[in-house]
Amino acid sequence: MNIQVLFLLKFGSKKNIENLLKKGEIYMNTINWFQNSDKKAVGDIYEGVYEIENLKGKLTLKVPNNPITLEKASLQLRKHLEGHIGNIYSTYAISNLLLKRKKVHKVDPRMKNFGSHCLIIKDVKGFTNAIFNKLDELGISYTHNIVQYRKLNGKKHQVSLFEKTHILSYQKEHRIIAWTKTNSPLKFEIGSIEKYAEIHTTEKIIETLKVDRL
């Protein structure tokens, strides 16, 4: 299926969303930050994971001098990429994927956890290219894509940075990953985007925004 992203939504505090609109302020947190954050819906224990193995049944833990046997265990082992990986910029993608299995799509109320305000970005190519151009100027390589959501309750899974648990599928994420060298936030400006973006409250977006077939 050819994926077409029609609009991007960026959720955040009123201050941060206004800075994005007026100055094009881009703030990219590190992958490690998302791994460790306890902020509701933002933190993700699967961030930076490359392999998941689910173990069920009788298990023996080899503790020195005192092995422990669990008769009905259910464990999940996760292998993480080591060290600093990069920085992420996430938006909510309004794409044709939203109507793949349903006639009408509405933004999930849980998106309130990401902030009180939302910016609708109507020139997706212009916005993303402005970010890419700035990263090029800074000498930082990058990649981007729509996140795919998967059920991770099978026995074993290989996972990329563009795959997440289906539990988070309501986030409809498009992400840009900047392959930075230092474990610190990345912040820069791309200039005003007022010509092709508009601010609304998150409440209004959830109540009124509807995506349906023509």
Image: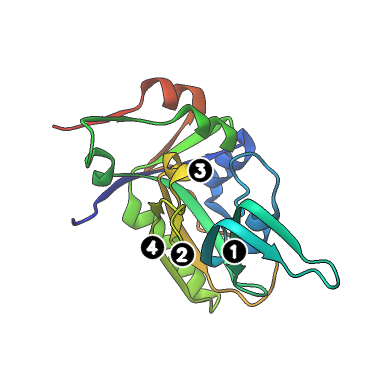
Res. 185 visible in picture = no
Q: Earlier in the sequence, mark 3 or mark 4?
A: 3
- Residue 83: where, in percent of width, then height? 67, 74
How far is mark 3 from mark 4, CA to CA? 16 Å
| Quadrant occupied by the C terminus | top left
Element at label 3: helix
Depth check: give the residue in front, 167 or 27: 167
Residue ID at (71%, 59%): 69
Which residue does the numbered mark 4 point to in the structure image? 129
Element at label 1: strand
Residue ID at (48%, 44%): 168
Depth check: give the residue in front, 72 or 170: 72
Asked if residue 202 is positioned above or below residue 190 in the image, the reply reads above
- What amino acid is at disc 2? Lys
Q: Is residue 130 left or right of residue 184?
A: left
Mark 2 burial class by Cα count in 10 Å: few <14, some 14-19, many 20+? some
Pointers 3 and 1 in contact (C-beta within 8 Å): no
- What amino acid is at disc 3? Leu
| Residue 21, disc | 3
Pointers 1 and 4 in contact (C-beta within 8 Å): no
| Residue 156, disc | 2
Q: Earlier in the sequence, mark 2 or mark 1?
A: 1
How far is mark 3 from mark 1, CA to CA? 38 Å
| Residue 78, disc | 1
How far is mark 1 from mark 4, CA to CA? 34 Å
- In this view, which residue lies farthest toward the right? 65
Mark 1 burial class by Cα count in 10 Å: few <14, some 14-19, many 20+? some
- What amino acid is at disc 1? Arg
How far is mark 2 from mark 1, CA to CA? 10 Å
Res. 203 visible in picture = yes
